[in-house]
Amino acid sequence: MARHVFLTGPPGIGKTTLIQKASEVLKSSGVPVDGFYTEEVRQGGRRIGFDVVTLSGLRGPLSRVGPGPAPGKQECRVGQYVVDLTSFEQLALPVLNAGSSRGPGQRVCVIDEIGKMELFSQPFVQAVRQTLATPGTVVLGTIPVPKGKPLALVEEIRTRADVRVFSVTKDNRNHLLPDIVTCVQSGRK
């Protein structure tokens, strides 16, 4: 039986919107929900990066459009975006690690997203694995559609017996919310 719920689909299809709506529905029914989501940052109508936003309202940069690395300095980059690992880890890791310090309890942990940018952080990879293994924690997350070289943690999640993956499309995105909420709630039992 699925305990964790992940959404997948192309960029911009509505995965984050569905995660936010599901979080609100779950919170309003008394379910403890924490975690984070990623949000586009735009300037003058142009996307310049992404922020990490925790469900408690903290915000910081995940990535920004940037020039190449300084000579001799390694940098984490996805396309035109330079990843701010320090900012990401300062926001995401405490939220993920909160569940293991809380002990067994029924909580939902939102992880939006487990993608190329986030996977530069080895502490994040370890924290995701730990969160998936924590009794009483249900993960509601997003993973990218497989494209190019497989991302090890994403494939590991996709093939777990305790994970249900919903593919979000333009045709179904307005009808998936009740199924997602029901699946998360049944994973909490």
Image (spheres, helix red, strand yellow):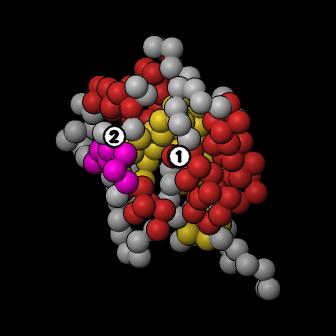
Q: Amino acid at mark 1?
A: Ala
Name, please, the residue furthest toward the bottom. Answer: 72
Which residue does the numbered mark 1 point to in the structure image?
Answer: 133
The x, y position of residue 11, in whole percent, is 39, 54
| Within-10-Å neighbours for mark 1: few <14, some 14–19, many 20+ | few
Whether residue 149 is visible here, answered yes or no, is yes
- Above or below residue 27? Residue 70 is below
- Above or below residue 184? Residue 73 is below
Q: Quadrant of the C terminus?
A: top left
- In this view of the protein, which residue sits in the foreground, 139 or 41? 139
The x, y position of residue 140, in whole percent, is 45, 39
Residue at image location 50% in from the left, 20% down from the top = 31
The Cα atoms of the two marked residues, 2 and 1, are separated by 13 Å
Name, please, the residue furthest toward the left. Answer: 171
Q: Secondary structure at mark 2?
A: loop
Q: Point out the tag, 2 or 1, that comes first from the N-terminus.
A: 2
Q: Quadrant of residue 184?
A: top left
Q: Amino acid at mark 2?
A: Ala
Horizontally, is 36 left or right of 155 in the view?
right
**Circle on res. 2:** 2
**Circle on res. 119:** none
Residue 185 belongs to the span the image colors magenta: no
- Above or below residue 184? Residue 164 is below
Residues shaded magenta? 160-167
Residue at image location 36% in from the left, 46% down from the top = 163
